[in-house]
Amino acid sequence: MPPTNKHSQRPPWLRAASFLALVLAVLFGLSKFFDHAARQNLREKAHWVISQRSESFDFAIMGASRPYVGVHIPTLEHKLGTKGVNLALDGTTYPEQYLALTLFLEHNHIKQLILDVSVAGFDNTAFKFPFRAYQYLPWINDPVVFHQLRDYFGWRACAWKYVPFFKNAEFNSKIAAVQRFTFVTSAFEVAPEFDQDGTFLIDRKFDEVDLENHPSASFQVETMLQKYLLRLLELAKKNQIEVTMIMMPEYHEYIARQSNRQEIIDFYTAVAASNSMPFLRFDQDAICLDKTKFYNKNHLNRSGAMVFSESLGGRLASQNVPRALPYNR
């Protein structure tokens, strides 16, 4: 009588369950590996911000694309005699800025937060990816990351965390497995677009077509984004960080086309007053008339960033910004 294969004696449901368990184990293992690989990719600005450890800065710049490309940290350091960093994240609204700053402050310290606010800041439709969840999914097992993603995205955050490769399927090219393998081999071989301070200066002439494509502008005001601005300010207060709100320059013709601009500025002004913080506006400065200082309707080029940073440094110096001994690079 031929020997009996004990595995063939298992009920079909048990064999199916065993196979499913094996597949899930492999998928979870691969997901962990890919997440680890993605965290090593410091070419992504958000990853660079999160990876900072045991740093102490006298000031930090926070905001979206305008300060990312428009604030030259060495110029501010020279004007203020202090040490700074640019934490601004391209194309982001306040919920993502709040999460990035929260994770940064878990391991670092700053004395002064210089927060750029914009008229488009409460309108998700003004941004291609207003909250780039895919940037933080490699850290989704961190309770801080998971709870914020769940607060903002609801049940999808649970699927990203508990269903293997659900996040890869949703964001595909952003965090695809092929890219993860690329990160492992090339993360430290290709320099990021931003410099050592976190700024990306752009050498480009003014884009006339971009201005022509925006003959008028009216921005929505979403309460969720207002809520996260206030949370961000509370986070700074909790960490004993002084906040200065700023509004960076935009090209004057684009400013004139924004129909509800004053209404949104009034909100920012009220927030600054209720929190007893300075609100420095540069949207009425002479630089706004100079097309050669912008590469599009609302972003400074390298030349404009240098001029603006000089002006910002001078204004901040008169606002009793916390100072240290002169900082030398």
Image (cartoon, grey):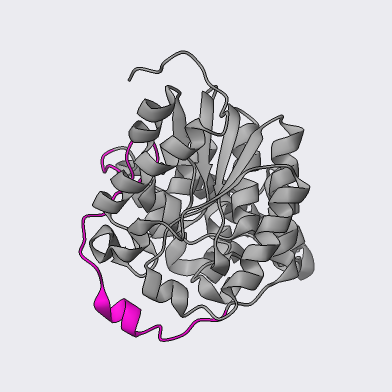
Residue 105 among magenta residues: no
How many numbered discs sit on the rendered protein?
A: 0
* Rendered location of residue 103, percent (x, y): 62, 39
Q: Nearer the viewer, residue 277 or 122?
A: 277
Q: Is residue 210 left or right of residue 67?
A: left
Give above or below for 75 relative to 147.
above
Give above or below for 89 relative to 297.
above
Q: Residue at x 53, y 26 (%)?
A: 58
Q: Which stretch appears magenta?
A: 189-218
Identify the image quadrant of the C terminus: top left
Image quadrant in which you'd find residue 309: top left
Q: Nearer the viewer, residue 283 or 191?
A: 283
Give above or below for 131 relative to 98.
below
Q: Nearer the viewer, residue 81 or 96?
A: 81
Identify the image quadrant of the N terminus: bottom right
Q: Is residue 209 left or right of residue 116?
A: left
* Rendered location of residue 216, percent (x, y): 46, 85
* Rendered location of residue 163, percent (x, y): 67, 61
Q: Residue at x 56, y 56 (%)?
A: 117
> Would residue 20 be seen by someone viewing this image from the given angle?
no
Q: Residue at x 26, y 50 (%)?
A: 302
Q: Residue at x 55, y 69 (%)?
A: 120
Give above or below for 232 relative to 120.
above
Task: Give the main secondary structure of the magenta stretch.
Answer: loop
Residue 200 among magenta residues: yes
Q: Is residue 131 left or right of residue 270?
A: left
Q: Is residue 315 left or right of residue 43?
A: right
> Would residue 210 be seen by someone viewing this image from the given angle?
yes
* Rendered location of residue 287, percent (x, y): 34, 57
Residue with the most extreme top position: 325
